[in-house]
Amino acid sequence: MYPPQKHQDNDKNHLIEVIKTYPLATVISVKDNTPLITHLPLIYREEDGKLIGHIDIYNPQTNLLKDKNKVTVLFSGPECYISPSIYTTTQLPTWNYIKVHLTGTVTQIENKAELKQSLITMTQFLEAPDHKYTLEADNPRLDKNLEYIKLFEISIDTWEGKFKLSQDKKPKDKANARQELLRANQQSITHFLDKIF
């Protein structure tokens, strides 16, 4: 697996924390040697270690998210360019990032009551910690849209953590890289939103 061992994290608790903090996943299926890619929030279900998601019935990938099909799932944490200028030692430019790569087996769940409850549960998770909105079970829009959504779960077969965070550098340089990751992510989000909106 690449990157090198020093940039790999096999602590499943760390990988689960990435999934919980950055739940928008890239879900990749392959049909006839062509990848189908959809970005979907997936929730990690603690009790059985499965990922739970929903997909629009009109998405062409929907038919591949069932029947024990295999998928690759990527979760992305923070990332940024690291300039040698932040280090106290001589270095070259690099890029720091956090990624989780999973492979899994998909099962589609046809039970409408389970679909409805999973949408409510996902909303509760995503609304944390403030819970300013509650998706009520008797919401008529929810019932109306159940016909257009498929529920699926992914049993995780393999886990890979790729945490390239300057952990091979001296303590001061490692701390500087951490601060740069925080600064750069805040600045890039602000800059991007200001340009677009």
Image (cartoon, grey):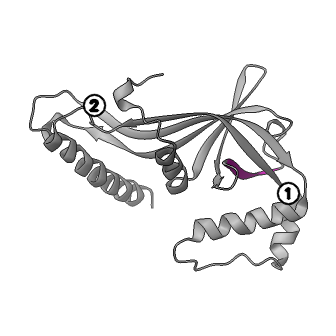
Q: Is residue 29 above or below residue 13?
A: above
- Residue 144: x and y in percent read 87, 69
Label 2 packing within 10 angstroms: few (<14), some (14-19), many (20+): few
Q: Which residue carries the number 1 mark?
A: 148
Residue at horizontal 51 percent and vertical 53 percent from the top: 22
Q: Is residue 179 above or below residue 164?
A: below
Q: Is residue 105 above or below residue 138?
A: above
Q: Amino acid at mark 1?
A: Tyr
- Cα distance, mark 1 to mark 2? 44 Å
Q: Is residue 107 above or below residue 21?
A: above
Relative to 182, is 41 on the left or the right?
right
Q: Main secondary structure of the magenta part?
A: strand
Q: Secondary structure at mark 1?
A: helix
Label 1 packing within 10 angstroms: few (<14), some (14-19), many (20+): few
Residue at horizontal 17 percent and vertical 34 percent from the top: 84
Q: Secondary structure at mark 2?
A: strand
Q: Which residues are magenta?
A: 50-56
Relative to 102, is 48 on the left or the right?
right
Q: Which residue carries the number 2 mark?
A: 94
